[in-house]
């Protein structure tokens, strides 16, 4: 998603896309992260499908903490340059590798084992997680998710590759 300096600028972009017929409504903006059209919040859409409630809660806790941290840094005047191509590449790597592979470490820019990158992320979000009252729950859910990895939960009906159906 492009960077917008204000909500008004984003809204104008949406209006222009609708006016030109490129889209018919704001829901057709298929960004991984976007402002909600229904409630005053930000939607994380990169993981629209998540089979475990525990994982949804974990992701929601982490996302809320990331948004809180970014808002705090904006208010403090912290400026950051993010290369969209690098974000797309890191997202692709994460989708491909999952918890068992390597993720691009956003600090160093090099691949590291997923658990290392994720634990580092959570540690960096600790103040926001504690402020929201989510630190303990996120820690427990993260520990469970990392122990389970990308494997389906027992009894979920999921089959491994090569299993008959």
Image (cartoon, rainbow, N blue to C red):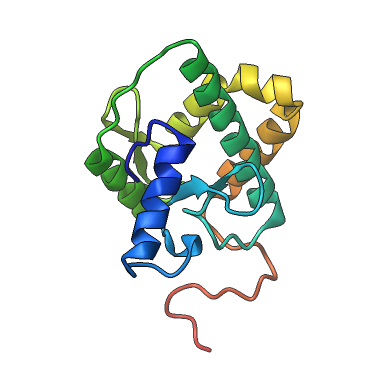
Q: Residue at x 55, y 18 (%)?
A: 72
Seen from the viewer's position, the closer of residues 130 and 33 is 33
Q: Is residue 55 left or right of residue 89?
A: right
Along the viewing direction, whichever of 72 and 128 lies nearer the viewer: 72
What residue is at 45 percent from the left and 30 percent from the top?
A: 116
- Find residue 145 and report its horizontal and vertical position in percent: 60, 45
Can the viewer see residue 95? no
- Choose top left, top right, bottom left or bottom right for residue 2: top left
Q: Is residue 86 visible?
A: yes
The residue lying furthest to the bottom in this view is: 165
Residue placed most toward the observer, 88 or 37: 37
Residue lying furthest front: 19
Q: Would you identify the image quadrant in which residue 135 lies?
A: top right
Residue 6: image location, x then y, percent: 44, 33
Left or right: 25 as drawn, with respect to 52? left
Outermost residue to the top = 76
Decide: is 88 above or below 138.
below
Is 162 left, or right, of 56 in this rendering?
A: left
Q: Is residue 49 above or below residue 10?
A: below
Residue at image point 64% right, 50% down: 55
Residue 60 in percent (x, y) is at 63, 43
State the residue at coordinates (31%, 41%). Answer: 87
Please tell me how many numbered marks the rendered image carries.
0
Give how far across and how far down residue 150 sits, in percent: 51, 55
Question: Splitting the image into 4 quarters, where does residue 63 fall?
Answer: top right
């Amino acid at each position: 998603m492009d960077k917008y300096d204000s909500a008004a600028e984003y809204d104008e972009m949406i209006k222009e896309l609708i006016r030109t017929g490129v889209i018919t409504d704001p829901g057709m903006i298929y960004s991984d992260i976007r402002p909600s059209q229904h409630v005053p919040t930000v939607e994380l859409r990169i993981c629209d499908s998540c089979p475990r409630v525990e994982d949804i809660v974990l992701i929601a806790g982490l996302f809320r903490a990331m948004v809180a941290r970014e808002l705090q840094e904006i208010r403090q005047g912290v400026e950051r340059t993010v290369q969209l191509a690098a974000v797309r590449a890191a997202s692709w790597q994460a989708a491909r590798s999952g918890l068992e592979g390597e993720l691009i470490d956003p600090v160093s820019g090099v691949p590291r084992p997923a658990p290392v990158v994720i634990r580092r992320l959570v540690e960096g979000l600790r103040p926001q997680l504690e402020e929201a009252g989510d630190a303990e729950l996120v820690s427990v859910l993260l520990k469970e998710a990392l122990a389970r990895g990308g494997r389906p939960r027992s009894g979920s009906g999921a089959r491994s590759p090569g299993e008959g159906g």
